[in-house]
Amino acid sequence: MPGSALASDVYDVDGDTLDASGERIPLRSEAGPIDAPEFGRAKCPLELLRAQAAQERLEKLKAPNDFSIDRRGRDRYGRTVTVVYSVGEDVGARLVREGHAKPWSSLLAKDRPT
């Protein structure tokens, strides 16, 4: 069952990672892991702009404060496997649908939400 969180208590690290009370939470969708451009790994100015756009979109999706984090265990690296919802909608899936992220199909099945 999803746990509620106030958007003001959850910070976006980049377009596909949140920080909730010091815990880094990689975003996933119900369909699996996602990947968005990251500031620290941008290889060109366009990728840096895309990273900024993804982070800004994530911030707007959090804004309504009807925000929940559905924790579904841990991956092989010990990170929380979650699906995040805003106003009942899968945030990771929305970022993919809008072109801010892409599905990350190379992760092992056990690292995916179930």
Image (cartoon, rainbow, N blue to C red):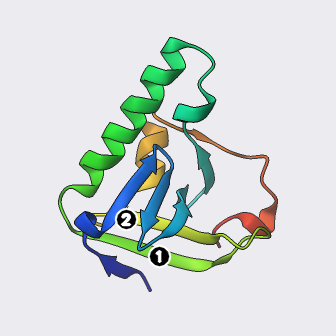
Residue placed under numbered mark 2 in the picture: 85
Q: Residue furthest left?
A: 64
Say the numbered circle drawn on residue 6: none
Tell me where residue 98 appears, x and y as whole percent: 40, 35
Q: Secondary structure at mark 1?
A: strand
Q: Is residue 52 left or right of residue 75?
A: left
Q: Residue at x 43, y 43 (%)?
A: 95
Tell me where residue 77 appears, x and y as whole percent: 77, 67
Q: Residue at x 47, y 76 (%)?
A: 70
The reply to whether residue 89 is in sight is no
Label 1 Cα neighbours within 10 Å, binned few <14 / some 14-19 / many ≥20: some
Q: Quadrant of residue 114?
A: bottom right
Q: CA distance from mark 2 to mark 1?
A: 8 Å
Question: Is label 2 in contact with label 1 (beta carbons under 8 Å)?
Answer: yes
**In the image, is residue 11 above or below residue 113?**
above
Q: Quadrant of residue 30?
A: bottom right
Please name the amino acid that badge 1 sits on.
Asp
Residue nearest the observer in this picture, 7 or 93: 7
Q: Quadrant of residue 104?
A: top right
Q: Residue at x 23, y 64 (%)?
A: 8
**In the image, is residue 30 above or below residue 105?**
below
Q: Secondary structure at mark 2?
A: strand
Q: Is residue 107 left or right of residue 30?
A: right
Of pointers 2 and 1, the one earlier in the residue sequence: 1
Say the numbered circle drawn on residue 70: 1
Label 2 Cα neighbours within 10 Å, binned few <14 / some 14-19 / many ≥20: many
Tell me where residue 54 appears, x and y as whole percent: 41, 36
Please name the amino acid that badge 2 sits on.
Tyr
**In the image, is residue 81 above or below residue 2?**
above
Q: Residue furthest top?
A: 45
